[in-house]
Amino acid sequence: MSTVHLLDYVAGNIRSLVNAIEKVGYKVEWIRSPEDVPSAERLILPGVGHFGHCLNQLAQAGFLPAIQKHIESGKPFMGICVGLQALFEGSSEDPGIPGLGLIKGKLNRFDDTAKAVPHIGWNSAFTNGATLYDLRPGSKYYYVHSFKYPYKAGELESQGWTVATGTYGSETFVGAVARGNVFATQFHPEKSGVAGLRTLRAFLTGEGASALAVPPGSEGTAIPPAPGNVTFEDGLTRRVIACLDVRTNDQGDLVVTKGDQYDVRDKSEGGNVRNLGKPVELAKRYYEQGADEVTFLNITSFRDLPLADLPMLEILRLTSETVFVPLTIGGGIRDAVDTDGTKVSALEIATMYFKSGADKVSIGSDAVLAAEEYYAAGARLFGNTAIERIARAYGNQAVVVSVDPKRVYVPKPDATRHATIATKFPGPKGETYCWYACTIKGGRETRDVDVVELARAVEAMGAGEILLNCIDRDGTNSGFDLELVNQVKGAVRIPVIASSGAGHPKHFAEVFEQTPTDAALGAGMFHRGEYTVKEVKDFLAEKGLKVRQFEG
Ligand code: 1PR
């Protein structure tokens, strides 16, 4: 079997890349030191985390001269995400740290005044008719980054690069580049479903490398029609996420369950833990229905330390072998003491999950407690929270904060210090105002922190995204709490995932049309087989909302 060498400069979350490479029929050999590089025929540099962190790690380990030599030798080289960014001269993310300088120019941050940053989700890699490692105008690719190279027609082409672009808001950025033996993608091919596997295979086989579609100097003119009858639609699609609440049932098996306002036990049948299926099977089913992401929430592990929770790691390993869209895992990620008394940090637990195939980790209870300490210290940070440490090591985009709020009704706004909203759904005593109190331990304990305080605190700590659940709506099939989503979206600039209450495809259309949410999540309606993810996305497409079509 042909091999490809993977430069693992840091124990990053790149198991999914290994799975994708093996899926397209290649074997991964690891590059652990600069001396290994000359033996590589094909070399992939996966980028994890920050620009400066990546370049510093490469420099300190002495990899930079070896990488330059590999590229100069004409042997195939591929950079992914920060691995593309490293090819440039630098980035405003870490101004003092130089890149490889293969491409003239410096990256800068997306403008977040009118859109969420990081740019997370499925967007185009439009080649404007050029051949570029089988990138296709009708396909979408998974991006997760805050910094980008702004595309100016003809600029990189004049340096001999063939370029694919994406557009986010009003900004068009470089999605992929190729020149000679070098190919690099800002998106993650290993998390971009079949479209991503296709371009990875094209690089590994060398098929359809790159060729300009238009003679140099005439770039940026009229866009030639996409091949075939594919309609090209630029821009970020609406993300539909399938969520699997996982816990051990009374027989000790890890099953997919689902709560009603977080109560996962059947009202009848002796109050057993609802068993809605096997985690690996259901995750694969939702991937094949077109889910843009899959989230596992391990809802028992806040009692049992994940280290003892090996089944969840095995579930991730198995799932990441057949599901090539982003996987998020939450539940029990916090500093803890293992059953044998050893201290285990949240970062170590997160690293176990990343090594098992997770792309993002989700922190719930610990984020609320960290927010309380943040405000108690006068809204100051000391770099020691789980969110800060994991974001520093793996990048902001790898950290999701899962919020478990419940409504607290008040007769008037000044009845509480918390951020209230006027609600269309009056309380039990006719109250027309409410605020949302955060809870920990799966809703078992309510804290004196509201969702606006929590969202702003975790954004300051470097969380990349908020998973906004709602205990009142959980499992009710009554639709998302649009008032809650609007309040949190109005408070932060990082992406928000609306969660809890979906029972019909129209609920997804509603939340995308009536709030600026960046994504929407469903659970029970999928597990009970009432609707498929595909039916939801087809419904959204009929409503004129931009969705990614699954490519089988
Ligand atoms: O606090 O860091 O250990 O994380 C625990 C995680 O587990 C949190 O993300 C918390 O939301 C979740 N969790 C804990 N207990 C429960 C429970 O149900 N008893 N699940 C639970 C919460 C929320 C979503 C759910 C949506 C959509 N579930 O996962 O899927 O509400 O459901 P629906 O579409 O069926 O309405 P930590």
Image: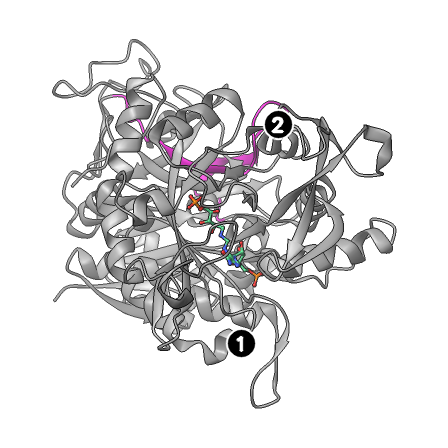
Q: Split into 4 quadrants, where in the image is the N terminus?
A: bottom left
Mark 1 element type: loop
- In this orientation, which residue lies closer to the viewer: 214 or 203? 203
Residue 25 position, x and y percent, is: 14, 59
Residue holding disc 1: 305
Magenta residues (range)? 100-128
Query: Residue 77 vs residue 90: left or right?
Result: left
Residue displayed at 33% across by 24% down: 540
Residue holding disc 2: 425
Task: State whether residue 291 is above or below residue 369.
Answer: above
- In this orientation, which residue lies closer to the viewer: 278 or 273? 273
Q: Quadrant of residue 265?
A: bottom left
Task: Tell me the mark number nearer the camera, choosing from 1 and 2.
Answer: 2
Q: Quadrant of residue 503?
A: top left
The amino acid type, in three-letter code, at marker 2 is Phe
Question: Is residue 114 found inside the magenta-colored segment of the image?
Answer: yes
Question: Is residue 188 found inside the magenta-colored segment of the image?
Answer: no
Q: Split into 4 quadrants, where in the image is the C terminus?
A: top left
Mark 2 element type: loop
Query: Residue 353 vs residue 425: left or right?
Result: left
Residue 369 position, x and y percent, is: 72, 59
Q: Is mark 2 within 8 Å of ligand 1?
A: no
